[in-house]
Amino acid sequence: MYFSRIQLNPQRRESRKLLANPRAMHGAVEACFPPTRDVQEGARNLWRVDADRSDVRLYVVSPEVPDMQHLVENAGWESSPVETIDYDRFLEGLRTGQEYSFRVTVNPVKRQFVQGQRGKLMPHLTEEQQLAWFDERSSGWGFETLEFPQERGTPDEDATVKSVRVVQRHDRVFGKLDGDSRRTVTQRQVTIAGQLRVTSADLLRSHLTGGMGRGKAYGCGLMTLARIR
């Protein structure tokens, strides 16, 4: 597996088009790989965009080395080349008990069941619901989120507080072909950051490369980690 990063120029026309439409960005990411490539079983391309004012970065996790030259030429900075590293070395170093800072964009949804029907997917609306959704799934993804004691002198200084927080929320609206018809898709994307402890290195590896939750084709599910020293 490979981990790649490219800095995008948000002032360029192609960048604005890609950043506004997750389906267009998905196509641009897939165009980094030859259509005749051999796809490994269970492997897929994951991507995520992090935007902080003028600093916009695209992250990609993939089974093959991507050719991002078209993104550099049309949406990036000539002075900022693509960075690609061998991700397997990092993945193989994961161990139970290690602690990391993390960031991930997810699509927190629930299925609203109707008698006699499969049910409709509905987004979780509040930050409390979205964080609860994330926390419920964390053990199945191979980690637990960290808690810290309250500062001394606070009204409830014996309690603990979760490190996890919602840092961004967006509703992405884009068109999608469904057979011969075209429909409008609205996807709620929630970026969550915090600190975690690895509880199952094998589970975490599989979800760092396979993604977390729904909406993986449209920029959700890619978690990045930074070791806590």
Image (tube, grey):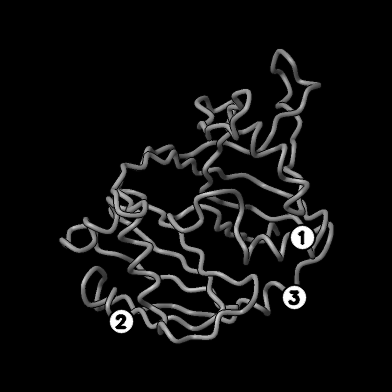
- Dividing the image into 4 quarters, which one contains the C terminus? bottom right
The part of the image, by quadrant, that contains residue 188 is top left
The amino acid on which the numbered mark 2 sits, given as a three-letter code, is Gln
- Residue tagged 2: 69
Residue ranking furthest to the front: 116
Q: Residue at x 83, y 57 (%)?
A: 97
Q: Which residue is drawn at 78% across and 59% down?
A: 98
- Dividing the image into 4 quarters, which one contains the N terminus? bottom right
Residue 139 position, x and y percent, is 78, 46
Q: Do the residues labelled 1 and 3 touch (CB within 8 Å)?
A: no
- Residue tagged 3: 92
- In space, the residues marked 1 and 3 are separated at their CA atoms by 12 Å
Q: Which of marks 1 and 2 is nearer the N terminus?
A: 2
- SS class, disc 2: helix
Residue 175 position, x and y percent, is 29, 48
Q: Do the residues labelled 1 and 2 touch (CB within 8 Å)?
A: no
Q: Which residue is drawn at 63% across and 23% down?
A: 115
The amino acid on which the numbered mark 1 sits, given as a three-letter code, is Leu
Residue 44 position, x and y percent, is 55, 69
- In space, the residues marked 3 and 2 are separated at their CA atoms by 29 Å
Name above or below for residue 213 compared with residue 171: below
- SS class, disc 3: helix
Name above or below for residue 67 compared with residue 157: below
Bin the neighbour count of mark 2 within 10 Å (Cα to Cα): few under 14, some 14-19, many 20 and up.
some
Relative side of 141 to 212, left or right = right
Name above or below for residue 14 compared with residue 105: below
- Residue tagged 1: 203
